[in-house]
Structure formats: C-alpha cells, structure tokens
Amino acid sequence: MSRPATDLTRTVLAVIFIGGLIVASLWILKPFLGALLWATMVVVATWPLMLAVQKRLWGRRALAVAVMTVALLLVLIVPLALAILTIVDNAPRIAGWIAAITELEIPQLPKWAADLPLVGEPIAVLWDQVTAEGIATALKRLQPYAGTLTSWFVGEVGGVGMLFLQFLLVVAIAAIMYAYGETGAAAVRRFGRRLGGERGDQTVTLGAQAIRGVALGVVVTALVQSILGGIGLAIAGVPFAAVLTALMFMLCIAQLGVLPVLVPAVVWLYWSGASVAGTFLLVVTVVVGTLDNFLRPWLIKKGADLPLLLILAGVIGGLLAFGLIGIFVGPLVLAVAYTLLGAWIAQGEAPHPPAGGG
C-alpha cells in the first residue's frame, strides 16, 4: 500500500507562517514582556498565600485578589516612593556630606582589626595604602567604577517614572492572574501535555515548584538580611536607616548582599569616633553578611525538590544573563532541562531481567 506523497511546499509555507506569526506576536508584546514575566513569577510564588487569604475571606476570590493587589502595591510602590521622598527632602544634607568626604582625615586602623584571621592583613594593607594616598586620591581611583555602575543602573531602571509605570503594570497583570489563575494554569498544563504527554505536564508542575523555591529562598533571605541589617543600623545611630534598609533589600535581591551598605557604615562610625557603635555594627555585619550562606540554600531546598547546585547555578547564571528577572528564569530553565534529560536517560534504559528466572 503506497503512502501519500508529502506536499513539501505546503509544509514549508506552514512552518514559515507559524514562525512569522510567533515572531510578530512577540514583537507586539515586547513592551509588556518584562512586566508579564515578573507578574508570572510573583503570582506563581505567592499563589499558596493567595489561596490562604481567600480561605480566610469566606472563599471570596474578589476580596482575596484585592488584598493581594494592595499588598503588592505596598511592597513595590511605597518603599520606592518613601526612599525618593527622603532623598529629595535631605538633598542639601547629602550634598554637604559628599563635599565633606574629601576633607576627612583617615585615622589609624585599630590593632584588633589588623589581627583578625584571614582578612586582617589585607585590610591593614588597603588601609595603609588609602592613608598614604589620601581620601581624595582614593575617590579618584574609584570614579571610573562609579561611572560604570551608574550607567548600568540607569540602563536597567530607565528613570524613576518608567520604574513606577513598570511596577504598576506588574501589579495590574498580577491582579488579573490572581483572578483567573486556575484557567491559566490549566491552559499551560494542557500545552505541556500536548507537547510531551504526561511528562510534559509534570515538567510544568516542576517549573512552578522551582519558581516557588527560588522565590522562597531569595526573597525571604533578602527580607531577613535587610531587616536585621536595618535594625543594626538604627541601633548604631546611622542616618537614613530606613532608606539604607530598602537599598540592602534590593542589593540582596540582586545577589550583591548587605556588605556594600554595612561595611561603609561601619567605617563611617569609626571615622566619627563612635567606636562602641562601630564595633556593634561590625558584629552585626559579620552575622548578617554570612546568614545567606546557609539560610538561602535551606529555603530553596525546602521549596523545590531539585539539586541545590542546579538551583544556585540557575540563580547566579540567570542573573548574569538576563538581569534581575533571570533569578527566576535561570532556575526554571535548568529545572526543565534537568527533568527532560533525566526522563530521556531513564527511557533509554532497558529493565534488567529478574535473577534466577522461572
């Protein structure tokens, strides 16, 4: 029985049409892709929380969506607005501090700091070098790096107004996803089953677990570190503790940690003659700065049953490749690839015959 001839032209034209349609759709959605990705990650990570809120509000989805939307607004918009207002209100004071930096006299490094194991000698060498050159020369050497950092930050943010608009768009899309989450999840799972059968459905579920695990590990760790660091700054009497706490939270989300904020604060306290407060904040810095080494892996492993090294590689690699959204996209991609590769290897292994057959 002869097989029907394949219409090669029709197949090629169909593939080109489908590919062009996908590219055109992505091109149209390009202004919203960033907000859509962020909203998806937020909703997937907080979906159990939304269900718990809905259960407490007599099962009313509309009330739960309203509560979660207001919470997202408070988390995203209010801290940014307060930080901007604080900086604007204290702009003359901040300008005076910046102008006075070049006139600071660097004191001698305390003996106990130079005697610290592992880090004492490098700190002493760097301190002596800065003391010999003067603070103005040291700042000039850091100026190119500051310019590069500023350019990167401006390129990522694109202006305060655009950042506000992006946050509002994320909240709006997240509210829609909260309202129709089950419908969207069912559509994604159907798509996964259409591509890979039952294994495709399991891969979609694993991807959601990976997102939730990374959100639990990264966000909760950043929240704990920034709160503890902020309490330490407030007790030590460092100005703008609230703004610095918000900055620490953003740096922790970006996997830079709390040290870029706490270490200069410790140095400033010692320069100001507040040795007791500086020592206290130094202890806080050591504790908070090393907290993520064991808290983040434990939380990530608790949220997703995947190899810890795989998730950490996805977090760091995704951050370097795609920016902040890569913190969630990286582990998701690696989790899906890991699952499909394991399933493919397992499918190719033939079952061993029973020993001593009969």
Image (cartoon, helix red, strand yellow):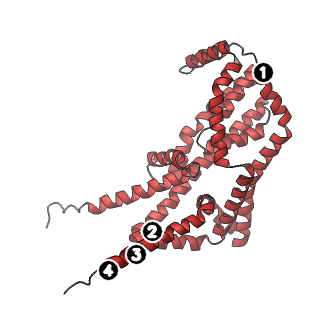
Apparent side of residue 159 relative to residue 296 in the rendered image (left or right): right
Q: What element carries label 4?
A: loop
Q: Where is residue 320 in the image (x, y as percent from the top left)?
A: 53, 44
CB contact under 8 Å: marks 3 and 1: no
Q: What element carries label 3?
A: helix
Give the mark toward the camera: 4 or 2. 4
Residue 59 position by quadrant: bottom right
Quarter placement of the N terminus: bottom left
Residue beneath disc 1: 272
The amino acid marked with disc number 3 is: Leu
Which residue was labeled with disc 4? Answer: 7
Cβ atoms at labels 1 and 4 below 8 Å apart: no
Q: Residue at x 68, y 66 (%)?
A: 175
What amino acid type should be assigned to the residue bearing mark 4?
Asp
Where residue 218 sits: x, y (%)?
58, 47
Q: For the residue labelled by badge 1, is the local secondary structure a helix, a strand or a loop? A: loop
3D distance between C-alphas at marks 3 and 4: 10 Å
Reply above or below: 35 against 197: above
Circle 1 packing at 10 Å, graded few (<14), some (14-19), many (20+), is few
- The kind of residue tagged 2 is Asp
